[in-house]
Amino acid sequence: MIKMENIAKSYDGNTMVIRDIGLEIKKGEFFVLLGPSGCGKSTLLRMIAGLEEITAGDLWIDGRHANELLPKERNLSMVFQNYALFPHMTVRDNILFGLDARKVAKKEQDERLNKVAEIMGLAEYLKRKPAQLSGGQRQRVALARSICSQTPICLMDEPLSNLDAKLRGQMRGEIRRIQRMLGLTIVYVTHDQVEAMTMGDRIMVLNEGCVQQIGEPLTVYNDPENLQVATFIGMPQMNIFRARAEQEGLRLNGSLILRRCGGQPCPAPAEECIVGIRAEHFRRGNESTGYVLEAKAAMVEYTGDETQISFENGQGYSVVKWPGQIPAEAGEALTLGVDAEHLYFFDKDTGHRIRQDGGRSQ
Amino acid sequence: MTRKAIAVLLMAVLGLTGLTACSSQTASEEVAAADNAGEESDAQETEEAADTGKTEILLWHVMSGDRLEQLEVIVDGFNASQDQYEVVAEAQGEYDEANAKFLNMAGGEGSPAIMQIGDQHIQAMYDSGLVENISDMMEKYQYDSSQLLAQAVDFYTVEGSLYAMPFNCSSPVVYYNVEALKNAGLDTPPDTFEGIIEAASAIAEANEGMKAFSITSWGYLLDQLLTNSGYPIVNNDNGRSARATEAAYQEGLLRFYQFIQDLIEADGFENYGESDDDINAGFNNGDIAMFITTSAWATSIMDSAPFEVGIAGIPHFADCEPQGVYAGGGAFVMSKDLPEDVQAGAFEFLAYAASSEVQAVWAANTGYYPVNQGAYETETMKTLYEEQPMMKIAADQLLNGQQNSITAGPLVTTLVQIRDDMMAGAELVFNGGDPQEAVNMAVESTNQQLEMANAQ
Amino acid sequence: MKHARHRLLGAAAYLLPALLIFVVFTLYPFVLTCVQSVFTTNAKGDLIGFGGLDNYVRLFQSALYRISLKNTIVYIVLTVPGTMVLSLGMALLTSRDRKGMGIFRTIFTLTMGISVAAASMFWTFMFHPTMGLLNTAIEMFGGEKIGWLTDMDIAIVSISIVTIWMNTGYCYLILLGGLKSIDKTYYECADIAGVSGWQRLKRVTLPLLSPFLFYVLVISVVNAFQSFGVIDMMTHGGPANSTNLLVYSIYEDVFVNYNYSFAAAQGVVLFVIVTGISLFQMKIVERRVTYQ
Amino acid sequence: MKKYSLALLYAVLILLAVLMVFPLLFTILLSLSDNADIMNGQYWPQVLHFENYAEAFTKANLLYYMKNSVIVAAVTTFCQVALALLAAYAIVFIPFRGSGIVFGLFMSGMMIPMDVLMITNFQTINAAGLLNTYAGIILPCIGSAFGIFLLRQNMKQIPLELKEASDIAGVGQFYFFRKVVVPLSKNSIITLAVYCFLVSWNNYLWPLIATTKDEVRTIQIGLRMLSASDTQQDFRLVAAATMIVTIPTLILMFFGQSRLQEGLTKGALK
């Protein structure tokens, strides 16, 4: 549906904001562009929309070469971060905005309006002005406008970032439902990894203008290509240690020791590297696991549905996350077990992932 | 998108042209349906002229108030007196703007056939080459110019031929409060500047501190006062023998400024700056006993004063023989190369306006004096001079004056600026400035202007 | 690249009408004035010979021009601060919503609706030497009549009074709007901190009002340089050229003396002065302005 | 506010109000008395002469001039606002390379004193045969640099996303201009309209230069001719004429005041 090859973007001719991006989005796919703010994800979206010029590379939309096409010739719609609703128009006019220009008959417009208003639950707000609506309602109107345009592709630039947590949760589900119902192809930009994980069919993680990884949410979570992806995905952030292989296990940060006790040998490379362990992969006590770590609890936090315990790791603190409310106090000794397959090894310099078969990912 | 942009462009340009069309259309439409209550509007006539087949003669003038009414009496009289020509009079505000427009239109479409100018504009009009040689016109239409006032003809003669037909002539006169002077033991105002200073204390005592004399700083009055005392304004015989190149009024102006300073010391002078209304209001209010201004306002001054007003000739310096005055005021110039019928019509109007009977009525109702010698013999003038002998004084002052280059009046392009320079100097002296310094400032400015004008 | 060219064409269509009028009726005449200023012209305005910088040299030598320059500076020193102080005072006094403020606000903006010609007439009646209101009032209190428009030193003050009276309406409107736009919270924290009266004015109100004060300053100076109507209606530059300001002297040279090139030179110098001062204000004064 | 300082506040306000209104009241007084009273300094007219106003209308042809003034001011205002809207829209919403220069050019227009250019404009109007037409008076005055400045300030407050949303929705430039930008600038448009009407109504020297006939002259010229006439000043008539000239704009000010204040303040905030 949308194909990009060696896309690059620079505003001033020398600093490259986007470097050599290639991707292909299939029809009806919910494709998420994920990355920290300033990584170029919005710029990439705006290049697809035609709001930014493409410095280099090729863009195809629906099989047509789209580099030179004007936004309206790309047959897509867009939902902006702060909704871009026309303050002086009623909700009805906002939703139907642009249909006159596309020569849609009045009767057809009303039909679409009623259908969309019902889907989005905006039926009784049609006469109101945007200023009289709540954040959530305004967001739904913006979405309704995109849907009403019946364009196959819908671009979304962090549409939920202005909503409160509860509403965000609700809207995530709703957008997903509508996308599946109408078979829309959606390109969704966000910096919130929860949205990415819950909504995306596939996620592209971006950083400083280059692609870190493209893949399904769980693949990206479980099999990160590099340190950026690993540390960016997952709450709390994956714990990172400098590791050196030693006789009875791994020396972490030159202080803690991850003792090996049975199970298959760990795939640690000979020379020094970085090892990452997710907070939820630590086991309690010394159940039969590949490795065991002795540490001292520094701080305990309860969020009701889970407990987070941080411990000294020689160069700062690492975190353990267990479900439920585990009784523990600061200073208590901890024995933490880890399975071999939950150890992620990365190259010390490049941050690339070092996998089981010794092969390095590019 | 481009198609849309072009549409906008077309719409905007059409809007503009539409506006131009409709506005000029509304203007002409207005002209036809003009609802002009009271004063006759020019619009009406242009419409009529078109239907009655009369040739239209466009006249620009700067008259206003009651003298505008008298001018329209003449225009209507002329239009009624024949059925070939229709004169349309249009007011142009003040001389300055009118002349600038006339010169800039350079005879183009919409410029007038006849234009009223002030005496100070004759040289500039001649230099512009846009005005007709009236002497040639007189020959062509066999007009006997001897009936015109010799002094008036002298003033508007440039290099041997007349370039403007005199129309409204006036000269400065002294208006005095008859009663106030009687109280001070004078039956007519002193005819010398020195006499005025002497009479100042007597007038003040007899009329509880009334100041003896005042004058507005208007340059026209000052150059006439110098003329009367025999001082030329510019060199080369007042610009008559050759083009004037520098000021020649220094000596005369210094003596006049000295007179004002002495009068101020004798507490006999009141300063009204340049405003004629203020000086007139002050005179009516009994603040001053005598003041000088143009004879043209005789009727309105005499009507508005709550006491008997006398008129006398302007004073001169004791040691100078009174020369009389030059024929100041205004005249009509005719645009050059007018089409035959318009030219004939225009000249006929000029002749009509200067004819004795018309001039008599004009003089009687305005305080100007007739430019036509025959007018003095007409019944209207005779009865006027009997009822108001005062009015005759202004005319006598001109008629009995000498005829020489001084009383022919200054012929110079920058007469307007010269009068402004004299005015600025006078206002300096009125405010207690030093006479010599005032004269130097005036002369420096006059010479600079002359130098620039002659360079063109 | 197609986009850029496309946008330029689109923009041109919108800009063309305004640009057309600007070029024909402002740019072309101004360029012609600059050209005329280095040529000599005849009474009809046609260019005769190349005059080089004679006009400018003669300009700075001529005593009259120096007088009109001096008058203009005196005029600005009188009118600009006068207008600002008066309109600021009025704005401060009527910023709080109290009983009857509406009437005062309407009255204070009244003069904005009054034309130059009408204002000149009002004040001509006021300044009339014998029956003018001011002189009659002075005489009632036993004072001595003042030659408002006839006295050389007072005339410039009189026309400044009229100008201040005319400009106050507009400036008051801006400053009142400015005061209203200041966020109430600043005053609340000033009240809490016990800062009040004079201190609050100096530390809170004036700094926050500075963008508007700056705007009024620029507008007043530019208008003062270009003021003409009052002089032409009331004093004709008199007495003794004491109210002959820059634009009036240009008017006189164009319409009375027909020295188009000399007037053109004065026009160019006036433009340079006004632009210079405005740029100076933009650069130096603006630095001290705090924008919310 | 203590009682004492409140009283002081109102005293000062009344003083200032009197200062501002007195020239107006005095003129109204003059316009209702007759010349004899005025001459000998007696101000309170025993008999109110309303016929002065009637005479002023007929004698000074004021009705005629006023009609012209209304036409000229209305058409000028409409064109000024239209042109300023179009130009400001291009400068703000169509980012082309030279937009900064073009805006600078317009702003420089504010610096050039119009009086200096009158003769050249007169020659242009004359050459185009527009002398004595409304267009002749109007055309040179409709390039309002201030208008462009004010509307640009206002349009810059419209979020750019609205333009982007419109581009994507497939709406043309003019549709966005007409349906979105103009409605959102309604306030500034009204402010500009009131301001331009006042400026055009008060325009003083140019209408005189651009015309030679009375048919198209505006009211300020009527006033100037009346006052500049060198005959005996007919005070009551001139006073009445002055009031007639001023009343329409005072009424406009009375209603447009709040709107003007709001709009101009936004304009002032660079």
Image (cartoon, coloured by chain):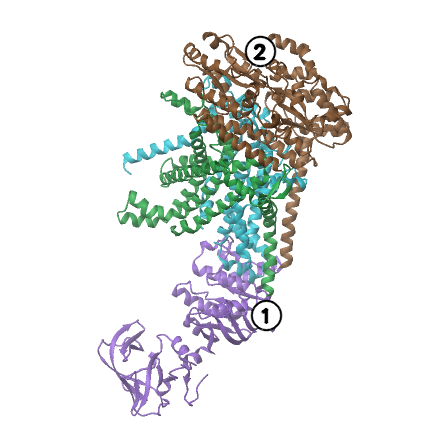
Chain colours: A purple, B brown, C green, D cyan
The amino acid type, in three-letter code, at marker 1 is: Ala
Mark pair 2, 1: CA separation? 99 Å
In terms of secondary structure, where does tag 2 sit? helix
Q: Is residue B253 above or below residue A126?
A: above
Q: Secondary structure at mark 1?
A: loop
The answer, for residue A260, to whether it is visible in the render is no
| Of A161 and A317, the residue lying toward us | A317
Write the residue at 59% across / 9% down: B389
Q: Is residue D196 above or below residue B144?
A: below
* x then y, percent, for residue A109: 58, 59
Residue B392 makes an appearance in the image? yes
Q: How many marks?
A: 2
According to the picture, the residue beneath numbered tag 1 turns out to be A66
- Residue under label 2: B390
Residue C1: x percent and y percent? 59, 66
**Callout 2, which amino acid?**
Met
Left or right side of A340 for B143: right
Image quadrant holding the N terminus of chain A, namely: bottom right
Which residue is at a point 49% across and 34% down the rendered structure image? C244
Residue B409, image quadrant: top right
Q: Which mark is residue A351?
A: none
Say if B208 sits above or below C283 in the image: above
Q: Chain of mark 2?
A: B
Q: Nearer the viewer, residue B145 or D143?
A: B145
Q: Residues within 10 Å of mark 2 (few under 14, many from 20)?
A: some
Which of the 4 image quarters holds residue A287?
Answer: bottom left
**How far across and down, in percent of the image, does residue A293 sit?**
28, 85
Mark 1 falls within which chain?
Answer: A
